Amino acid sequence: MKEVILLCALAAPGIAAASEVGHWYVTPQIGGISVDNDRPLQDKDWLYGLGIGKHVSDALSVEMNLNGAQIGGGPGRADLSLYGGSIDLLGVMNRAGRVSPYVSVGMGVAQNERSPGSNATDFMTQAGLGMFMKLWENQNGSSTFALRPEVKARWNDAGAEGHLVDYIGTLGFQFSFGPAAVKTATVAPPPPPAPAPTPPPPPAPRDSDNDGVIDDLDRCPGTEAGVAVDAFGCVRKGSITLEGVTFELNSARLTGGSAATVSKIGRAHV
């Protein structure tokens, strides 16, 4: 049995697993029992059992466990048929993992049938350690199969003086069934907001009359082209001094040299 348990432990990490909360299960068991030294029996014998239960939460399973063993008494001693029935609570760790260890506690009755001899029904309690090792599950997770090694100590006639302690080791073949696993949809995060469009550049300032002063500052719109204007777009006003221009005495007629100068200035501004 040790070799089988070791082989299953090595195989389990490569097998997928899913939570079985809400599933019922049935677990046929086979193993052995080592009885208390105070029993007039041989030390060890085979034991067979059956567990029926439900995984009620991530951390708890509840089951009814039944088992029985035929234990020989040896020469001159009565044989014993020992049957146990209990309600067990299993505290489970790593429920969704491939390997889920657990601790168990339970109570029930132990039926002692001696042949020959009298029968007795005793109150018993038990505690143990075990693990669920999932080997298979169907596509939607509604059915699974697992191996379940377990060891227990069982106190017969618990609480009474001189009570007996038997030790049980089993390997279970667990079939679980229930609602399909609920798959959580992965919601993609929303895309980042698109950057705001770049506003178009402002229009260039207008100069409708082409006098070199923009319309917003032009106080004299419509100035004729080529006319000198001031900073506000209005025709310049005032006087100018022409150096070297003279007139004949008591006359409005330009002297010969002055006429040439005025003519030259005129040509320069055409």
Image (cartoon, rainbow, N blue to C red):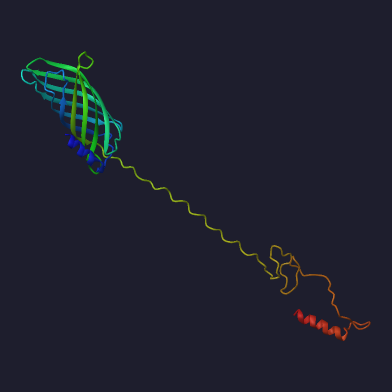
Q: Is residue 191 left or right of residue 234?
A: left
Query: Residue 254: x and y, percent?
Result: 87, 83
Q: Looking at this view, name the residue that lies furthest to the top.
A: 161
Q: Can you see residue 143?
A: no
**Residue furthest left in the image:** 76
Along the viewing direction, whichever of 10 and 157 lies nearer the viewer: 10
- In the rendered image, residue 244, in percent from the top left (x then y), is placed at 86, 80
Residue drawn where x is 22% and y is 35% of the image:
176
**Outermost residue, bottom side:** 256
Query: Is residue 188 or residue 89 the one in the foreground?
Result: 89
Q: Quadrant of residue 117?
A: top left
Q: Is residue 207 left or right of residue 6?
A: right
Residue beneath the point at 83% across and 85% down: 260
Residue 261, percent across and down? 82, 82
Q: How many marks?
A: 0
**Foreground of the two, 114 or 238:** 114
Name the image quarter holding the N terminus: top left
**Vertical relation: 211 (above or below) 163:** below
What quarter of the picture does the C terminus occupy? bottom right
Q: Nearer the viewer, residue 27 or 35?
A: 35
Q: Is residue 192 left or right of residue 179?
A: right
Q: Where in the figure is residue 8, as x and y percent of width and height?
A: 21, 39
Location of residue 23 (image quadrant)? top left
Q: Is residue 254 above or below residue 209?
A: below
